[in-house]
Amino acid sequence: FDQEPATRQDPPLAELRTTLKRMLDRKPAILKIATSITRYADVVTLETLRKEIPAGQKHVIVGMGDKARVQRLLSPLKNALTYACLDDNEQAAPQSVATDVAAPGQVSLSTYRELAHLKNPALYGVLGGPHVTASLSPTIHNRLLKAHNIDALYTTFPADDLADLHEHTTLGSNIAMH
C-alpha cells in the first residue's frame, strides 16, 4: 500500500480482505499486514480484519502512527510476534515516545517490559490533541495499576477532533485541554 504521504489513505476493509485472502492462499507460516492509521476507525478496521483470520493461522496485524499506539501496546497479546525499538536511554520513562523507531508509533522495548504482566487488560486513557503523547499520565497510572495487580492499560489517545474517538472503546478516560 505504498502511496505518497500527502495522498495516503488507509485501505478500506474490502481491500484489506482481498489482500488477506491472497496471503492466505499462499499458506504462510505467519502473515503480516501493516498499514498507516490516521483515524481511530482504522484501528477498528484492522481489529475487524484480525477476527476474520482462521483460527490457528499465526499473524501480525499492526497499525503505524500515533493513533495506532494502543494497538501496538497490546501487540504481544494479539500477534504471533511484535516489533520494538531499543531505547536511546534505558532510563527513559516507560510509555515515553521512542526516538529511534523503524515505523511510526513503534513502542520501545522498555515499555513492553513494563507491560509484560498484562493478560486481558481493561483499557483506559487520556484524550487530547497531538501534545497528549508527551503526558506522564500513562507512566504514573500503569505503575499504579501494576503495583495493585490490576490487569489494565492506561495510554494516550491523540486526536484533532474528539469525534474521531467515538469508535474506540475504553472503560474510562480523561481529557487534557491545552
Image: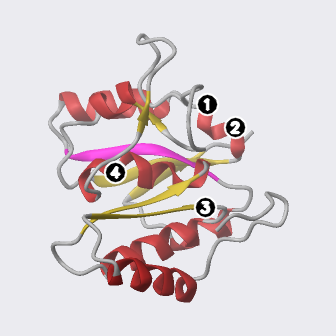
Classify mark 3: residues with Cα within 10 Å, few (<14), some (14-19) or many (20+).
many
Residue 25 lies in the magenta stretch: no
Along the polypeptide, which appears first: circle 2 or circle 3? 3
Instruction: Identify the mark at residue 134; answer none if there is no mark.
Output: 1
The residue at 64%/68% (across/down) is: 1
| 107 horizontally vs 79: left or right | right
For disc 2, the marked residue is: 131
User: Of helix, strand and loop, which one carries label 4?
Assistant: loop
User: Of helix, strand and loop, which one carries label 3?
Assistant: loop
Residue farthest to the right?
Answer: 6
Instruction: Please name whichever residue, 146 or 94, is drawn nearer the observer in this view of the structure.
Output: 94
Looking at the picture, the colour scheme in use is secondary structure
- Identity, as a three-letter code, of the amino acid under mark 2: His
Q: CA distance from mark 4 to mark 3?
A: 15 Å
- Identity, as a three-letter code, of the amino acid under mark 4: Leu
Tag 1 near tag 2, CB within 8 Å: yes
Instruction: Identify the mark at residue 37; answer none if there is no mark.
Output: 3
| 160 horizontally vs 119: left or right | right
Along the polypeptide, which appears first: circle 4 or circle 2? 4
Q: Which numbered mark, 1 or 4, is in the foreground of this view?
A: 4
What's the magenta bit mostly, secondary-structure-wise? strand
The residue at 25%/55% (across/down) is: 80
Residue 157 lies in the magenta stretch: yes
Segment tinted magenta in the rendering: 151-158
Along the polypeptide, which appears first: circle 3 or circle 1? 3
